[in-house]
Amino acid sequence: MANQRTLSIIKPDAVAKNVIGEIESRFEKGGLKIVAAKMLQLSDEKAGGFYAEHKERPFFKDLVGFMTSGPVIVQVLEGEDAIAKNRDLMGATNPKEAAPGTIRADFAETIDANAVHGSDSPESAEREIAYFFAADEICPR
Ligand code: RTP
Ligand code: MG
């Protein structure tokens, strides 16, 4: 599998818990490089647009409410098979089902506040990276 990029978000619960560094360390030790990053307070509009695929789901309103409840880190991770690798490091959506040693198992308690986001396909990675970053804000290295 070739070098890939994926969009990662450290969600408000993890930022509030002050575990940004510990989560970044998982990515770096897992072989992913941070090639772009910024801290943002998302608006309802920005968070809703990001999760547009879930617009009709019953949890959409709570999801937007949670994602705007405090600052997030949005970032681009790069590496071999980065999309799948990131999701492996994150663990299952529901932290109660996440494998031991994954970010969600170690830093999250509920499916609503589950510490991190990661793109789920090359198509969503491309859309999500462009949603938050201009080309000149990404620094391959
Ligand atoms: P994410 O998009 O945040 O990386 O999470 P994911 O791919 O593992 O899960 P996804 O199906 O895309 O859902 C997005 C977020 O919505 C919340 N969710 N709640 N109550 C529920 O049944 C439910 N299902 C999903 C989660 O916070 C999930 O991260
Ligand atoms: Mg998802």
Image: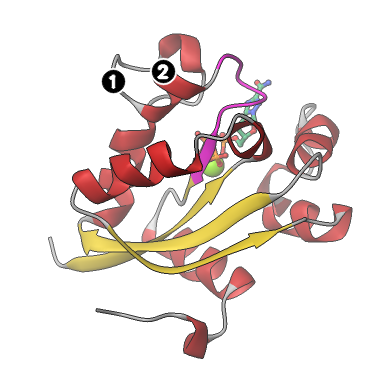
Q: Is residue 135 above or below residue 65?
A: below
Residue in the picture at 85% in, 35% down? 61
Question: Magenta segment range?
Answer: 109-117
Residue in the picture at 55% in, 32% down? 115
- Location of the N terminus by quadrant is bottom left
Q: Is residue 141 above or below residue 121?
A: below
Q: Main secondary structure of the magenta part?
A: loop
Mark 2: give few (<14), some (14-19) or many (20+) Cα within 10 Å. Answer: many
Where residue 110 sits in the image (x, y, percent)?
61, 16
Q: Is residue 111 left or right of residue 44?
A: left
Q: Which quadrant of the figure shows ligand 2?
A: top right
- Residue 22: image quadrant is top left
* Circle 1 residue: 101
Q: Is residue 66 left or right of residue 10?
A: right
Query: Looking at the picture, which amino acid does disc 1 mark?
Result: Gly
SS of the residue under disc 1: loop
**Residue found at the very far left of the displayed protein:** 1
